[in-house]
Amino acid sequence: MNDLPYTIEDNKLLEALADIAYLAGQKGFFSGDSRNDINEFITWAKEFEAVHEDTNWDEVDYLTSIEAFTENKLRIDVQ
């Protein structure tokens, strides 16, 4: 099952996407259009990865960072 031809970058993006979607769901986020929400989460995950391209995750807590990023995006998107 781990034979998928994904790169490390793909896996990082997928992890960020899964975390963002999970956190948004945990906060009860739903715009009324699930397809739009999914597209938005993909955009956010790409942005998160771009912002943190050079982040050393041994020095910075990943979960704190993605939680703060997602909470900020949810506040911006809800307004």
Image: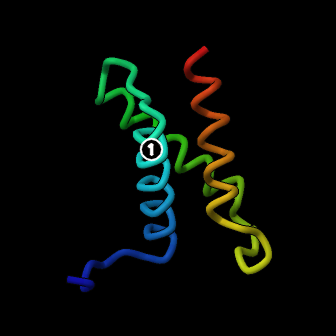
Residue 58 in the image: state x and y as whole percent: 73, 80
In the rendered image, the vertical position of residue 61 relative to residue 44, given as above or below: below
Q: State the count of labels.
A: 1
Specify how the rendered protein is coloured: rainbow
Residue at the outermost top position? 79
Residue 73 in the image: state x and y as whole percent: 61, 33
Residue 49 in the image: state x and y as whole percent: 61, 57
In the rendered image, the vertical position of residue 69 relative to residue 72, given as above or below: below
- Identify the secondary structure beneath mark 1: helix
Residue at the outermost right position? 59
Tell which of 23 and 41 is nearer to you.
Answer: 23
In the rendered image, the vertical position of residue 18 relative to residue 56, given as above or below: above
Q: Residue at x 44, y 67 (%)?
A: 10
Q: Which residue is mark 1?
A: 42
Residue 54 in the image: state x and y as whole percent: 75, 68
Q: Residue at x 54, y 42 (%)?
A: 44
Q: Along the horizontal axis of the image, is 3 left or right of 51?
A: left
Q: Along the horizontal axis of the image, is 55 left or right of 69?
A: right
- Residue 70: name its quadrant: top right
Q: Residue at x 46, y 63 (%)?
A: 15
In the rendered image, the vertical position of residue 77 relative to residue 22, given as above or below: above
- Residue 71: name its quadrant: top right
Q: Residue at x 41, y 55 (%)?
A: 18
Q: Amino acid at mark 1?
A: Ile
* Quadrant of the image containing the N terminus: bottom left
- Residue 2: name its quadrant: bottom left
Tell which of 9 and 73 is nearer to you.
Answer: 73
* Quadrant of the image containing the C terminus: top right
